[in-house]
Amino acid sequence: MSTIRKRGNSYQIRVSCGTDVSGKKIVESMTWKPDETMTPRQIEKELNKVAVQFEEKVKRGTAVKSDKKIKLYTLCGIYLEMQKKAFSPTTYHNYKNTINVYIIPMLGHLRIADITPLHLQKFINVLSEQKTQNGTTLSPATIKKYFVILQSVFHFAYKMGFLEYNPSISANVTLPKIPPATITILDEKGIRNLLECLEGEPIMWKVLIHLALCTGCRLGELAALQWEDIDWEKKQVKICKSMYYINGIRGIKLPKSNSGNRTITIPDYMIEMLKYYKNRQTEQRLISTQDWNSNHMLFTTQKGEFIATRYIYTWFSKFLKRHNIPHIKFHALRHTAATVLLASGTNIKTVSSRLGHSNLSTTNIYVHALMDADKAAADTLEQKLNLHYKVGQKGDKKT
């Protein structure tokens, strides 16, 4: 049962929720203030109605918590602590960094109950004007990513009962428009040039680049591969984990979704290259005086330790520069693998499965890229072959 006590011009409604483990009573409370124009009878009727509704909310666990003065700064701390086990190490690091660098400095001083869509729109607008260390403004995609993190915090507050209304609903704000994504793809000539330049590189790097093009795997997935992930008889590679690198610490995490767990069949030449590479690596381990590659990783540092993804990024960038190849991101190899398969007639569902996409709409970007490339080819033919020809012009012969 709820109890009501008058406090000045308002009323405090209290609902008992039992006791905690130490036997201390748990009480939820709220304050209700009647409109000045209400009669005593109207006040009594409305007060009883509010009390009943509040008691029902408490029983369902959806009542707003007693501390309505909680600030966003405090809520963010609770949110990160509660989500730490649910997030992957990289997601937790990114969320924590965004909250500390952007969300708390701008909104952390406000009570969550006082934050309105207007505050959130101002947050978006400030992000749009803010300069990075390079002197550029944040991209629309980055701003959306930061706002999604803020939405996650408010959704958590709503679920936990800190809020009765979630002000961060997307319909309440206007985000900057994100331009269509552009992806870099190597054409047949570019692939051939890349692989020819690769011939003079150490075997580990040759295997890494060839495997990236054969599987379309993400860099973190390639870096986390162990020899036990290779099925020599079935000629398959098992993708079930990913390498991360945060503040100088390397580690292995599980895929974000079930679709990330997959098995990819690779061509015969890739199996032969892997066998040769494994023999070379075994020889290196045998002559080493230290516990070299005890985790049986495919790709290692010269000391036989886990290889960081940023180390691979650095090597790839230097490799391109050394051979006068126009700079591309390592991820372009994944894009290239997808488009080569689609252009060769592989159905989109198979390509999506190999890439580890959770839905086909993500894979569709490569279909669009192929259509754009085909249109560009037609435009080239127009420029090269159409010498201002017009249908029905003089000189046409009837057949």
Image (tube, rainbow, N blue to C red):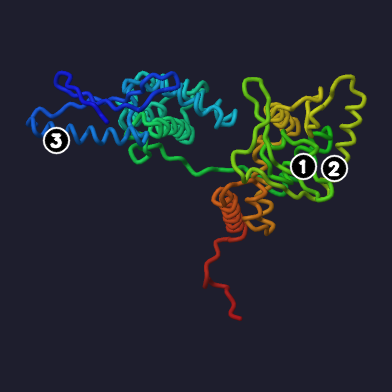
Q: CA distance from mark 1 to mark 2?
A: 9 Å
Q: Nearer the viewer, mark 3 or mark 2?
A: 3
Q: Mark 3 highlights which residue?
A: 45
Specify the farthest residue to the front.
Answer: 23
Q: Residue under circle 1?
A: 210
Q: Residue at x 37, y 27 (%)?
A: 123
Amino acid at pointer 3: Lys
Q: Residues within 10 Å of mark 3 (few under 14, many from 20)?
A: few
- The image quadrant that residue 194 belongs to is top right
Query: The disc labelled 2 sits on which kind of residue?
Result: Met
Which one is closest to the eye, mark 1 or mark 3? 3
**Upstream in sequence: badge 3 or badge 2:** 3
The picture places residue 71, in percent across and down from the top left corner, at: 36, 20
- Residue displayed at 56% across by 25% down: 93
Which quadrant: the C terminus? Answer: bottom right
Q: Residues within 10 Å of mark 2 (few under 14, many from 20)?
A: some
Instruction: Find residue 6 and report its image quarter.
Output: top left
User: In this rendering, is residue 10 above or below 46?
Assistant: above
In three-dimensional space, the C-alpha distance between marks 3 and 2, rounded to whole angstroms, equals: 82 Å
